[in-house]
Image (cartoon, rainbow, N blue to C red):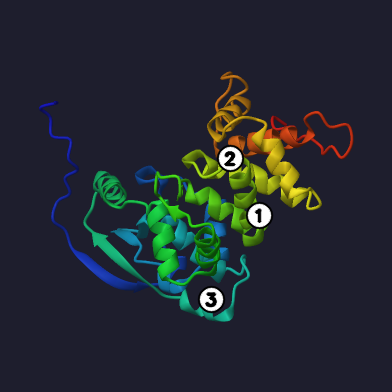
Amino acid sequence: MSGKDYSYDIPDHPIEYKKVDPRTIKFDPRAQRNLNKARARAIAEKLVPTALGTPILSERGDGLYAVDGMHRIYACQLILAGEVSVAKGIREAVRIITCEVHSGLSMANEASLFIIKNKESSKVGPNDEFRIGLLAGHPLFQDTNDVLEKHQLKVGSSSASGVRGIKGILSIVMDHGPETLDQSLTIAEDAWGRTPDTWYAVTIGGIATVISKHPDLNRVELADKLKRQGDPTAFKAKIQTIATNNNTRADGTKGRLKAAHLAVASAWNAHRRVNRIPLPNIFE
């Protein structure tokens, strides 16, 4: 262990909570991440004023500068500039926002404050997000939970009735609807029974993509075709091999989903001369 003190020290300084017009707030990327305007626009389009939080500012000699919450602030600026179309009530709600204002900080102090705030804050994990979203009564989480309960599946469990990768499962519902998730889970269980890898979110996503693109496919026949590919663990490994092109390239979630689409479509086409479906080019 190093004998050096690597903690971030910030001197005592005044802190106030002030009502601020977000249009007056400036940005200085030297003390924090660069502004991602596309990300800020996405935030603006779905902004919930009551969930805006309290952005952190530093009061310098020439004005107020964002330390933390830069993208939320810029989202407010986009809304007030009329560059993003939102309801009138939202526009009115962000004309003045409450901010935590620090004064007397150097640039180095600002950078330390940014790091501390971001190190101390932890992103909500997907399982907790699902639990909290369900408690909040959000339709996405409710619809997903209804399907999982129908199949007697629990989120986060490593048992034969446990779903891991809930983010992927939620994406299926967002992209294709709860009915497609329901059908995909049924096909997977008919093919492989109830095992932990049966519910691998990427595999389920591949099935969902295929039946969504080809709604007339016989579900029973697709399950039989998948069963002939081997057990679900072997099919999961096949997806990984396709996604990495035999370990010659890196993969990511999107890459694995494309590979799962290809693997499921290939399983359907196997030994078939008619009623074949197009195979996606996953590396284009």
User: Residue 128, percent across and down?
Assistant: 37, 57
Q: Tell me, yes or no, if residue 37 can be seen here.
A: no
Q: Tell me, yes or no, if residue 52 can be seen here.
A: yes
126 horizontally vs 4: left or right: right
Number of numbered callouts drawn = 3
Along the polypeptide, which appears first: circle 2 or circle 1? 1
SS class, disc 1: helix
User: At label 3, which amino acid type do we have?
Assistant: Arg
Viewer-nearest residue: 165 or 79: 165
SS class, disc 3: helix
Cα separation, mark 2 vs mark 3, equals: 52 Å
Task: Give the residue at mark 2.
Answer: 192
Cα separation, mark 2 vs mark 1, equals: 14 Å
User: Residue 18, percent across and down?
Assistant: 30, 72
Viewer-nearest residue: 186 or 257: 186
Cα separation, mark 1 vs mark 3, equals: 41 Å
Which callout, 2 or 3, points to the residue nearer the camera? 2
Task: Give the residue at mark 3.
Answer: 91
Viewer-nearest residue: 131 or 77: 131
* Label 2 packing within 10 angstroms: few (<14), some (14-19), many (20+): many
Task: Give the residue at mark 1.
Answer: 183
65 horizontally vs 277: left or right: left
Which callout, 1 or 3, points to the residue nearer the camera? 1
User: At label 1, which amino acid type do we have?
Assistant: Gln
- Quadrant of residue 206 within the rendered picture: top right
